[in-house]
Amino acid sequence: MFVLSASPSAFSSAIFISATSSRVSSVTLSSSKLFAASVRFAGKRSFACPCFLAMAELVKDKEASSSSSSSATSVSSSGVSAVASGSTSESKEPSYSRAFLNARTEEEILAGIRKEEEAGRLPPTVASGMEELYHNYKNAILQSGNPKADEIVLSNMAAALDRIFFEVEDPFVFPPYHKALREPFDYYLFGQNYIRPLIDFSNSYVGNISIFSEMEEKLKQGHNIVLMSNHQTEADPAVIALLLESTNPQFAEKITYVAGDRVVTDPLCKPFSMGRNLLCVYSKKHMFDVPELAEMKRKANTRSLKEMALLLRGGSQIVWIAPSGGRDRPDPVTGEWYPAPFDASSVDNMRRLVEHSGAPGHIYPLALLCHDIMPPPLQVEKEIGEKRIISFHGVGVSVAPAISFSEIAVSHERSEEKAKETYKEAFYGSIAEQYNVLKSAIHGKQGLKSSSPNVSLSQPWT
């Protein structure tokens, strides 16, 4: 859950490429902003996230890229979270209160939240958020009709609250490029098992499953893959991985998500974010929430841009990015959901990074429909700590063939700006088309009959 929030906003601002130190000092924020502190990149747990905003200029540094593969871990289909799955000893982590893991009933879990708040170890805002999260998750799992609902709620929420409390006591720092933490605690599997019971797989679909296999083959050949996507919920990465779990699990685990600062600063999000590969950015939407931090955010964004350039130079990378700069939201008048508009400069700058990486690259349009399981607030909020509404529902993911800028540019030889706009519209149009097919299948209850000439739906887990 809560793995991704606001992706980078439109990558249209100028990049400030300059020598930066390995330490970013931030200003302590008010209690409503929670836990701002200096950032250290020596592996020691700390807080705050250095991130990036724009890609108007390509990075020219000559450092060699390094990559490491994360181990594939089998995932139980029970929906019950394993606290430390198949990794080395949990005892390697710092000693801290195990109040929630030791709880055996709902009453003990809720009493544990109140106890830690009264002891001053949990800020009141975090404590209330944890209690609200428990009740909302419980109600969603009960909606599913799962005969093991009570067991799932107790197990998954005990693990989630334990990890949230751990982050409050000993906050973790996200570097510009964060590799998913798989041991001694497997945060990836933790997130998968938490979201799995929220998905109605009988009413969920994958579009064009063969293209996911095509992309996987290109990765093996050293090519880079970029997924240009709409963005619906904090759980998007888990949804993608769960729907591809039976066919392309390693592909899903390898994805690096361009993630906004909200999911690496909100204590309820952080444990879920820690299980994903992330390129951390500060979204333009929140760049000036605290004016005195704006310059620090810009510099941090530059470091993240350099990390992306280095990754792509190494080849065999999958990068997910939402050029809308945030989550989709319903029309305020009609209440209808649709993919948020894309920014042409965001799309074009991502293209330029891929083209200048030195490795073959392909950019694919990816559509997500999953807003029901965890819809965002109706309006963009400045404060950390949004209300989490959770439901049991069908979801969908679909991908279409890669879109080539060179082919589009041929018909716009006299206007580069027109070519960029057409390129952006090609991605958005493809995603909107795929989204409508998923919407017909899931919300319209048309199922596989919703398949179209361009979008072939399937349920590979059946």
Image (tube, rainbow, N blue to C red):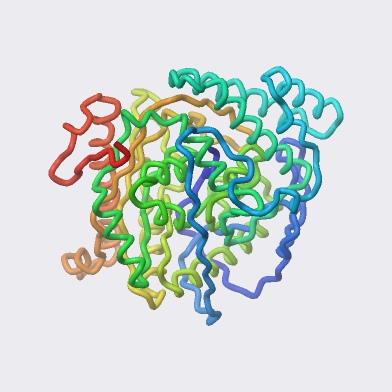
Residue occupying image coordinates x 59% and y 49%: 186
Dividing the picture into quadrants, the one containing residue 158 is top right
**Residue 51's x, y, as percent?**
59, 57
Hey, which quadrant is residue 199 in on the image? top left
Residue that protrudes farthest toward the left in the picture: 453
Which residue is located at x 36 percent, y 62 percent?
A: 225
From this viewpoint, is residue 182 visible?
Answer: yes
Q: Is residue 207 above or below residue 68?
A: above
The percent position of residue 305, horizontal first and vertical second, equals 53, 65
Q: Nearer the viewer, residue 54 or 138?
A: 138
**Percent of width and height locating residue 281:** 56, 55
Q: Residue furthest bottom?
A: 62
Residue 63: give x, y in percent of width and height: 55, 80
- Which residue: 17% across, 38% down? 451
Residue 24 seen by the camera: no
Question: In which quadrant is the C terminus drawn?
Answer: top left
Along the viewing direction, whichever of 333 and 125 lies nearer the viewer: 125
Q: Number of marks in the image?
A: 0
Does 254 sit above or below residue 5? below
Residue 329 vs residue 132, the one in the foreground: 132
Query: On the rendered structure, is 207 left or right of 311?
Result: left
